[in-house]
Amino acid sequence: MLAVAPLLSFRLEAQTFYEIGQSTEQHKKVMVAAHRGANAFAPENTLAAFRKAIALKVDFIEFDVRTTIDGHLIIMHDADIARTTNGRGKVNEISFKEIKSLSAGAWFNASFADEKIPSLRDLCEAILLHYDSGGYQVGLYVDCKDANPQQLVDSIREFELLDDCVFYGSDEYLMELKKYAPGVRIMPSLRKASDATEKINMFSPYAFDVSWTALNENLIRQLRKKGIKVFTDAPHQELSEEEYHQVMRMGVDLIQTDHIGALKRAIESFYGQ
């Protein structure tokens, strides 16, 4: 286990300068979340993709959590393993040992053939190693696909990373999650502006994941007045600089993307740096 004391000292000092997921250079700028890691450079939801995202200085890494048949939390988007591994079957019908024997990168490129499906523990240990080496503070954007909420919270709390997380999932799941950790930062989806008041009353959320098509200045202004952050997912295709600038003008707090480079260039041109 990594030494935690130096890490905690570094993190407490860092929090006096910026919020989780924002470096001093990026303070007040729109934040960047790497969708399933830097998936244009390395196979999605692998440690290689997460390390590359951190190397690119993203503010958040987004990842998906599922559970094996024998109760281990792993990082994978699909319920079926066929698309991103050399195996077949559903995650919740496969043992952790079998999952760990598969290649999670051969489909992407032969150079990643030895990349494995990470467990949640693997990812947390990698983040601690990053911090322990003096790395900047990165946010964890947790997409709760199929995981017992108490187990998920307890597993992340073990590494003292719970405060670094924002949790996304179904409304029902997030309500259950809050029972086990009332103070966690949750982010329900918001697909229609008309649903905002009801969801604010239901969740008192840290942020909303607002649908790209539902974004408008008035909605964002109202949410920010209530102290609620606005996260959004850019479409999978790479957008033009002006399309990125349009949502930046509205005042969104974070854009999740598959195209880290294009978004970062748009941010630099928008803020004049």
Image (spheres, rainbow, N blue to C red):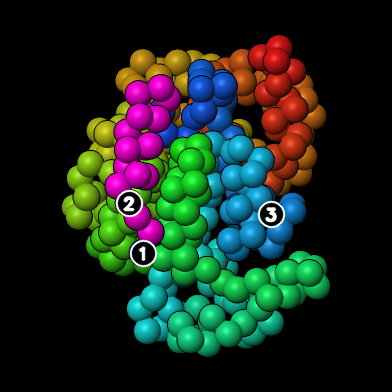
- Numbered disc 2: secondary structure: loop
Locate residue 119, reporting x and y percent. 47, 69
User: Which badge, 3 or 1, is on the more N-terminal residue?
Assistant: 1
Image point (70%, 32%), residue name: 263
- Picture disc at residue 85: none
Mark 2: which amino acid?
Answer: Val
Is residue 260 left or right of 76 when viewed as pictured? right
Where is residue 239, by image quadrant? top right
Q: Where 144 sits versus 34, above or below?
A: below
State which region is magenta.
Answer: 2-18
Disc 3 from disc 2: Cα separation: 29 Å
Name the residue beneath numbered marker 2.
4
Name the residue beneath numbered marker 3.
39
Is residue 13 left or right of 212 when viewed as pictured? left
Disc 3 from disc 1: Cα separation: 28 Å
**Circles 1 and 2: CB atoms closer than 8 Å:** yes
User: Which badge, 3 or 2, is on the more N-terminal residue?
Assistant: 2
- Numbered disc 3: secondary structure: loop
Mark 1: which amino acid?
Answer: Met
Is residue 18 left or right of 260 when viewed as pictured? left
- Numbered disc 1: secondary structure: loop
Name the residue beneath numbered marker 1.
1
Q: Disc count in the image?
A: 3
